[in-house]
Image (spheres, rainbow, N blue to C red):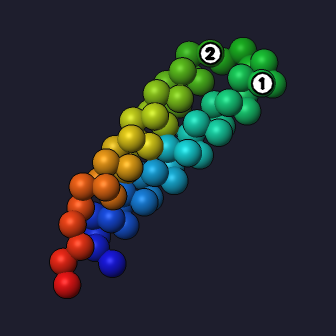
Amino acid sequence: MNVKRTFGAILTILGIVGMIYTGYELINKSSAYTTLSVVGVIGLIFFFAGIGLVKNTKDEA
């Protein structure tokens, strides 16, 4: 498997985890909105960067 695809998959998973954590804490009415917004934005960046990396990397045999 290509290293770029592996790194993209890891970034995507980290982004999903960050977004789930942010959603969970918002539902539980956490008072740390600044921290949640930072985690949510970083999660979105990781998610879209990982998806883009997996999508744009060509397989070479």
- Which three-letter amino acid code belongs to the residue tagged 1? Ile
Q: Are marks 2 and 1 in contact (CB under 8 Å)?
A: no
Closer to the chain start, of discs 2 and 1, is 1
Q: Residue at x 37, y 67 (%)?
A: 6
In the rendering, which numbered label is found on residue 13? none
Label 1 packing within 10 angstroms: few (<14), some (14-19), many (20+): few
Mark 1 falls on what kind of element?
Answer: helix
Q: Quadrant of residue 7?
A: bottom left
Relative depth, front residue between 49 and 28: 49
Label 2 packing within 10 angstroms: few (<14), some (14-19), many (20+): few
Relative depth, front residue between 31 and 43: 43
Circle nearer the viewer, 2 or 1 = 1
Mark 2 falls on what kind of element?
Answer: helix
Q: Residue at x 77, y 24 (%)?
A: 27
**Count of labels in the image:** 2
User: Mark 2 highlights which residue?
Assistant: 33
Q: Position of residue 20 (x, y in %)?
A: 65, 39
Q: Quadrant of residue 36?
A: top right
Relative to 6, say whether 20 is above or below: above
Q: Quadrant where the C terminus lies?
A: bottom left
Q: Position of residue 10 (x, y in %)?
A: 44, 58
19 vs 54, left or right, is right
**Residue lying furthest bottom in this view?**
61
Relative to 47, say whether 42 is above or below: above
- Tell me how far mark 2 sits from mark 1, CA to CA: 12 Å
Q: Residue at x 23, y 73 (%)?
A: 59
User: Mark 1 highlights which residue?
Assistant: 27
Q: Quadrant of residue 32?
A: top right
46 vs 30, left or right, is left
- Which three-letter amino acid code belongs to the residue tagged 2? Tyr
Relative depth, front residue between 30 and 56: 56
Relative to 28, say whether 3 is above or below: below
